[in-house]
Amino acid sequence: MVGWFVLAIALVFAINMVPALMPATWMVLSFFYIQFDLPLLPLAAFGALTSGLGRAVLAIGSTRIVELLPSSRQSHLLELGMLLNDHRNLLAILCSSTR
């Protein structure tokens, strides 16, 4: 049972370090809870903490990767970020219509 718990937490960490095209954390935790009868409260607590840690590693890692890029690429990414922030409402509409 401990092995499945560790695997569940490791998987939650891994999927939260990937920015897209991964299953939601609650889906992974639900699967392990139902399939392997893991204790709910520790699974939820450690899953939430690990999920946040994975997202923090993603944020820090993406910042570090951008710092390694040439300055011209960095300025293009900055411009793209500003454009997306300026048109946040339009972006939300476009993303919701593709589902």
Image (spheres, rainbow, N blue to C red):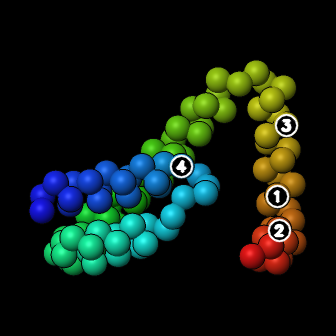
The percent position of residue 38, horizontal first and vertical second, equals: 18, 72
User: In terms of secondary structure, where does tag 3 sit?
Assistant: helix
The percent position of residue 95, horizontal first and vertical second, equals: 78, 70
Q: Which residue is mark 1?
A: 84
Dots 1, 2 in contact, CB < 8 A: yes
For the N terminus, give its image quadrant.
bottom left
Q: Nearer the viewer, mark 1 or mark 2?
A: 2
Q: Which residue is mark 2?
A: 91
Say if 51 sits above or below 96 in the image: above
Question: Mark 1 and mark 4: span between their CA atoms?
Answer: 20 Å
Q: Which of marks 4 and 2 precedes in the sequence?
A: 4
Give the amino acid type for the residue marked by disc 1 in the picture.
Leu
Question: Mark 2 and mark 3: span between their CA atoms?
Answer: 19 Å
Dots 3, 4 in contact, CB < 8 A: no
Q: Which of marks 2 and 1 precedes in the sequence?
A: 1
Question: Mark 3 and mark 1: span between their CA atoms?
Answer: 12 Å
Crowding near pointer 4: few (<14 within 10 Å), some, many (20+)? few
Give the amino acid type for the residue marked by disc 2 in the picture.
Leu
Q: In the picture, residue 4 is in which quadrant?
A: bottom left
Give the amino acid type for the residue marked by disc 3 in the picture.
His
Q: Which mark is residue 18?
A: 4
Q: Which residue is depicted at the point 87% across and 65% down?
A: 87
Say if 76 sits above or below 22 in the image: above
